[in-house]
């Protein structure tokens, strides 16, 4: 399934200045109420997981509280800050409410926050200064921005970023890695120039003013600081004369190479044949930062790790083939009738999906020890695979809790609804996935690590790989 992020703000006391160009214009309550009803109706009609982690009573209360506050004219950003917490209450990592497209485009030319930030143990640290190479700010703790103390700002950002359910690491990982300190600061009224308070690792406080940097310049500076990305979506390497194999899955795509010459299926067949030839005893599977892709590859990989027939999904459900809110999406089309079966409750079950029904193990079965590396950036298809690995007790899990829920998600075909007045963008999936797993004692969480791993800012800056180091240590003890 395609991956996505949820971004939702709590209404906060930070003063928000007028937006760029036309976005300072205030809309009357009547028009905002219309947009609100469209968003609520779309979610209640079509989001099959709306009550998966929050009850209907909880969602109804959230909708009602927010609606009562539409009692005055608001800008699009005012309205976004009011409505987004309701969307976040669904706790779906594939669902989000975002700025109008025109505002997103305008922000591309706006000076943005120039520091890359990482959230570690509940505190914000300067990972990179993209405006100034070799900046002394790097490694410092970030205490405030434009007078807003960091503990308050992080609390607000944690309402913006979410994974599935009550997963713990996803919020802070996404705040740092995906962009909580880019455009999203604008939603709190935090604009250039940026007056920051930092504390060095030696304990010295400083107050500095940063001019900011455009998105294009920010991305160019970030790319210059990084190593060239690996060219393939997956690869396999061996250590210790083949006794230990390391399988890295970066994306679950149809092809592993940019030229589209080697399919994921072909790669797996070759990889597990090589494991058998080398008589590998331990396999380390790395799905850190892998936020998803296609459904079938996750099931294919698991089929090499289990030697009996198994079920992967129990069912895939959509609430309807078409909806009233499709009029607000340019490319919306009804779900094809031949892809679904109508159920007694009026909903539809998807048929002919490759992950439905009894699945068969692959011939090149690997019986050795399996270690899985995961973090807060592990999501969607990666989490489906991890749930199966956990349910069948075929892995030892190292790192952080991933962003996806244990029992499934809501994704599949996505809709992009632009409400008519504020032009806010609502994105969510129409298909609710039910994973063929059971008896997990944390139904609102993802797979919890057997060996949790945490970093300091110094370890991140020096490039330590603590998860891999631990996995190799455990594998080498496995005689």
Image (spheres, rainbow, N blue to C red):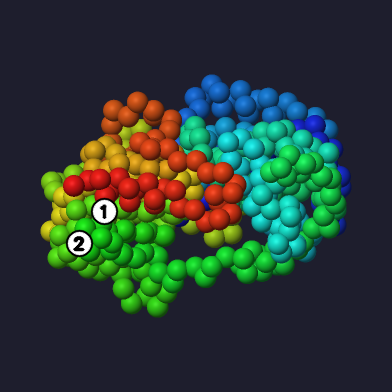
Give the percent coordinates (x, y) of residue 401: 44, 39
Q: Is residue 220 left or right of residue 49?
A: right
Residue that carries the numbered disc 2 in the rendered image: 275
Q: Is residue 383 left or right of residue 239?
A: right
Does residue 115 show up? no
Crowding around mark 2 (Cα neighbors within 10 Å: few <14, some 14 to 19, many 20+) is many
Please report contact status of discs 1 and 2: CB closer than 8 Å, yes or no.
yes
Q: Nearer the viewer, residue 24 or 186?
A: 186
Q: How many angstroms separate mark 1 from mark 2 (CA)?
A: 9 Å
Q: Position of residue 329 (x, y in %)?
A: 58, 55
Q: Quadrant of residue 343?
A: top left
Mark 1 or 2, nearer chain start = 2
Residue placed most toward the observer, 124 or 360: 124
Give the percent coordinates (x, y) of residue 308: 13, 46
Left or right of 104? Residue 268 is left
Q: Based on the displayed image, in which of its 4 quarters is residue 395 positioned? A: top left
Helix, strand or loop at label 2? It is helix
Q: What is the number of the mark on residue 283?
A: 1
């Amino acid at each position: 399934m395609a991956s996505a992020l949820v971004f939702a703000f709590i209404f906060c006391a930070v003063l928000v200045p007028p937006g760029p160009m036309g976005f300072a214009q205030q809309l009357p309550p009547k028009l905002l109420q219309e947009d609100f009803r469209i968003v609520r109706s779309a979610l209640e009609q079509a989001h099959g997981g709306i009550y998966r982690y929050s009850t209907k009573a909880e969602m109804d209360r959230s909708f009602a509280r927010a609606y009562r506050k539409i009692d005055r004219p608001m800008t699009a950003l005012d309205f976004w800050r009011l409505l987004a917490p309701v969307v976040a209450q669904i706790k779906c990592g594939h669902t989000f409410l975002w700025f109008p497209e025109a505002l997103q485009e305008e922000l591309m030319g706006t000076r943005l926050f120039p520091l890359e930030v990482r959230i570690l143990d509940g505190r914000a640290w300067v990972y990179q200064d993209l405006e100034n190479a070799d900046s002394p700010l790097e490694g410092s703790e970030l205490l405030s921005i434009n007078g807003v103390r960091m503990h308050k700002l992080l609390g607000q950002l944690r309402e913006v970023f979410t994974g599935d359910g009550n997963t713990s690491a996803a919020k802070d990982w996404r705040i740092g890695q995906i962009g909580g300190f880019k455009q999203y600061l604008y939603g709190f009224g935090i604009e250039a120039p940026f007056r920051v308070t930092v504390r060095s690792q030696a304990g010295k406080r400083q107050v500095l003013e940063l001019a900011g940097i455009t998105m294009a310049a920010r991305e160019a500076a970030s790319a210059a600081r990084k190593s060239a990305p690996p060219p393939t979506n997956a690869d396999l390497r061996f250590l210790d004369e083949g006794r230990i194999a390391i399988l890295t899955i970066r994306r679950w795509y149809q092809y592993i190479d940019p030229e589209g010459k080697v399919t994921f299926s072909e790669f797996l067949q070759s990889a597990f044949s090589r494991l058998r030839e080398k008589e590998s005893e331990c396999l380390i599977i790395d799905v850190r930062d892998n936020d998803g892709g296609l459904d079938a590859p996750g099931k294919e990989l698991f089929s090499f790790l289990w030697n009996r027939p198994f079920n992967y999904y129990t069912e895939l459900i959509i609430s309807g083939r078409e909806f009233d809110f499709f009029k607000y999406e340019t490319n919306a089309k009804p779900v094809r009738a031949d892809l679904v079966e109508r159920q007694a409750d009026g909903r539809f079950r998807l048929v002919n999906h490759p992950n439905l029904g009894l699945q068969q193990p692959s011939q090149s079965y690997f019986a050795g020890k399996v270690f899985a590396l995961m973090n807060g950036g592990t999501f969607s298809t990666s989490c489906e695979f991890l749930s199966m690995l956990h349910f069948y007790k075929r892995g030892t899990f190292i790192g952080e809790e991933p962003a996806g829920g244990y029992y499934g998600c809501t994704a599949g075909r996505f809709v992009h609804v632009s409400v008519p007045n504020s032009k806010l963008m609502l994105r969510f999936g129409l298909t609710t996935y039910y994973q063929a797993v059971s008896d997990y004692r944390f139904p609102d969480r993802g797979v919890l690590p057997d060996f949790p791993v945490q970093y300091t800012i110094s370890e991140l800056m020096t490039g330590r790989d603590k998860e891999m180091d631990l996995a190799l240590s455990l594998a080498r003890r496995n005689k």
